[in-house]
Image (cartoon, rainbow, N blue to C red):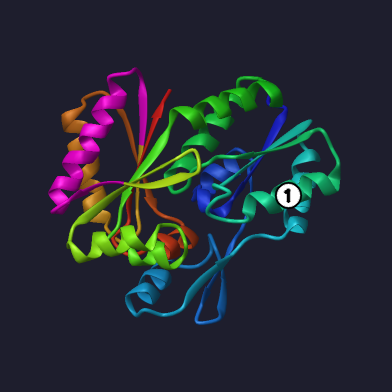
Amino acid sequence: MRTVGLVVDSTFGLDLPYVKKHNITVVPLHVYIDGEAYIDGEIDPALVIQALEDKKDVKTSQPSPETFVEAFKAQLETYDEVLCLTLSKTLSGTYNSAMLAAEMMNDSRVLVIDTETTICGGEFLSERAIEVFEAGHSLAEGAKVIEKAIKDGYLLFTVDNLQTLARNGRLGRVSAFIGNIMKVKPILRFKENVLELEHKVRSFPNVLLYLIDAARKIVDQGETAIRVAYVDQKAMAERLINDLKEALPGISVKLSGIISPVISAHVGLGGLGVYLAKI
């Protein structure tokens, strides 16, 4: 019998059937397009993509601590304990809001963990948490599994233009300038809250080759789960999925779908992410 509830933020991109099936509470962030507010998870991702193409002012905001308090209380009506997973604290103040909420409640039954990742990384970690808790493990036992999974997994992604990341303070402006002036496709690594420009290639086919090679290296270390998500390049994401299955038969590969509008607003057009995790 599962005794631990789960709270996540909307950037995890969990689909509604999965959320309902496992009784997960999703706390939404917000997107602002030219000052007009939208709820992440409810806004059509195409609106953010169009806004980015039209170079409109796109901003985001974190949930309030009070929203997390409500989420924790709702889960405690059903479960003995609650785990809250948030996107990386270096990308958003969402983790801080959740921590403040936990402090406001002063309840040892609530634990907040920074996943230190984003895009499809949060999706994988939330699915892992559900597996552990449905196997009957406690909050403390599940937390150990998740913390190890965080250290064992990492995100690789590419974008069309590094300026969006630089403008939002996620990447150094010098790296952004170099990447754009050379007309190359950047490959970035995000692991344990650190974002780095890892490699540069000349074309998208070379991006695919690099990502497949990275997947092969982690697969060689043992059983691996791979998640793929995109901003506006669905065809390229599907091609990557097919190439991964062909190059690495038998691996667990899943197309997570469109990246959360909040994250898309910071990643920018052409965003394609791959989360690589040991199982």
At 57% from the left and 23% from the top, the residue drawn is: 145
Magenta-highlighted residues? 198-226
Left or right, residue 108 beside residue 46: right
Dividing the image into 4 quarters, which one contains the C terminus?
Answer: top left
Residue 109 appears in the rendering: yes
User: Which residue is at a point 84% across and 38% down the rendered structure image?
Assistant: 107
Quadrant hosting residue 162: bottom left
Query: Residue 275 location, x and y as percent?
Result: 38, 39
The percent position of residue 32, horizontal first and vertical second, equals: 54, 74
Position of residue 173 in the picture relative to residue 146 (left or right): left
Q: Which residue, given by chain and number where applicable, does mark 1 sit on?
A: 71
Using the image, determine if residue 236 lies above or below residue 136. Answer: below
Instruction: State left or right for residue 56 relative to residue 84.
Output: left
The residue at the point 57 percent across, 31 percent down is 129
Hey, what amino acid is under mark 1? Ala
Was residue 221 drawn as part of the magenta stretch in this picture? yes
Q: What element carries label 1?
A: helix
Q: Nearer the viewer, residue 86 or 1?
A: 86
- How many discs mark residues in the rendered view? 1
Give the vertical position of 17 relative to 136 (above or below). below
